[in-house]
Amino acid sequence: MGNETKIPAPTIERLAQYSRPLESLLESGTTVISSEKLARLCGVNPAQVRKDLAYFGEFGVRGVGYDVADLLAAIKKILGSDQEWALCIVGMGNLGRALVENENFKKRGYRFVAAFDSDSRRVGTRLPCGLTIQPISRLKEEVESLMVDIGVISCIPPEAQRAADLLMDAGVKAILNFSPAQVRTPECCVVQNVDFSVKLENLVYHLQKIEETGRPG
Amino acid sequence: MGNETKIPAPTIERLAQYSRPLESLLESGTTVISSEKLARLCGVNPAQVRKDLAYFGEFGVRGVGYDVADLLAAIKKILGSDQEWALCIVGMGNLGRALVENENFKKRGYRFVAAFDSDSRRVGTRLPCGLTIQPISRLKEEVESLMVDIGVISCIPPEAQRAADLLMDAGVKAILNFSPAQVRTPECCVVQNVDFSVKLENLVYHLQKIEETGRPG
DNA sequence: GAGAAATTGTGAAATATTGCACATAGGTAC
DNA sequence: GTACCTATGTGCAATATTTCACAATTTCTC
């Protein structure tokens, strides 16, 4: 395949998941992997792996498998994670401060270039990563001059929509939202929500089912 | 409906999402809401809302809508988030420390009752929430005596599987995994993954598409 | 170099999920 | 108590996603 078919959203999600074990395999010196083994490492069906990749081209060798380094590079290219991206963050509570220092982000070329908070008591604080927390009033100017690609929202829920609006007004086209509030955006801006408490409630549903029936629901 | 049909996983995920705006509506004094308005608040289709709820019973009044307080209570009961649940956490880096203090967890009745780390330099630290970081060697005994329901993994990827194994050995049946490593568990243990970097790479894919075509992929 | 073994890429079937469209029923006005 | 308005609950069609199953291709063995 490899032409411009509409790619299913779950496929994109899984491509990123495939890259995690590939990174480990590359480090550990494994050069080739089959769809079956990669699938097992990711907890999915082998045909799924092959079909997901087939949307973008032919990356494997029949009878052999996939070259680990090549496949990882191909997936990164597809996703766009072979480039460096500039992030800013709004809301510097416990979570915000943890995210700014997060190793997983750094390792993959995501760089935080600005941090904002609406609380004047936090403004001016120098963070371990070298950034200084700035007031929301400086957001537009900073985001524009630093050419921020992605905005991270880690503020309290009532402020989330305002943060999103400010980011979009400053030209940001992608938002990673850690607040449990839904943010509304026009079609031109992509949002991904990371809501822990939704995941927790999911777990709790299954736990309850286990207690009732002895099996997950 | 209301009988024991197999409930789709996306339905469970959305139920938790519905409860977020319902909490706000309840606080703001709104007593009744239609599936259409709730759907708009959550960014889904109104029929979806009705169908999701219909799996569990009839909660609305035709011609009127849903009573906000009743619906929220019903959803919490369905999910099991009307109960208190005991959590422990493994891995007390920046993220772990932020999660333990997180307001969204506390507010919804999720209580952290123990915190562990494999790094002896962190062990013994007293956290703002009152817990003291304990060595991994104490995990089994503590988790059993405190009757922990859910284990949260926020350690570095290479240690994630070991953390999961220890938690399961101590009888934990549900794991919330923040590490980008896949953890393997037997069927009796439920895992939910919260992988920020996967979400980020998703965003980046769409950003790249916007740059190429002017529209999200 | 022919046959066996392995593993990809993919059309087609199976399954799952979503959304439409409308019958059904509660509430309100007169 | 009848007519009308509104919004739920749901059968069914449409769409999306996953999985199967196998032909195609490469490597290995003798």
Image (cartoon, coloured by chain):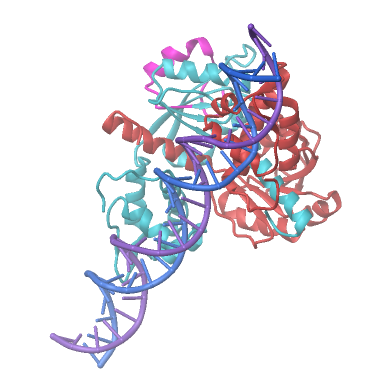
Chain colours: A red, B cyan, C blue, D purple
Q: Is residue D11 above or below residue A98?
A: below
Residue appearing at x 59%, y 33% in the figure: B98
| Residue B133 appearing in the image | no
The image shows residue A50 at horizontal and vertical percentages of 60, 35
**Quadrant of the rendered structure where residue A127 is?**
top right
Residue under the image location 60 percent in, 59 percent down: A184
In the image, residue A179 above or below residue B173: below
Is A135 above or below relative to B80? below
x, y (%) of residue B88? 47, 25
Occupied quadrant, residue C23: bottom left
> Residue B178 location, x and y as percent?
57, 31
The image quadrant that residue B58 belongs to is: bottom left
Nearer to me, C13 or A96 = C13
Task: Residue B146 in the image: state x and y as whole percent.
Answer: 39, 20
The magenta stretch spans residue B137: yes
Residue B191 magenta: no
Position of A78 with respect to A40 (left or right) is: right
Quadrant (top left/top right/bottom left/bottom right) for the N terminus of chain A: top right
**Nearer-the-camera pick, A35 or B172:** A35
Q: Which residues are magenta?
A: B127-151
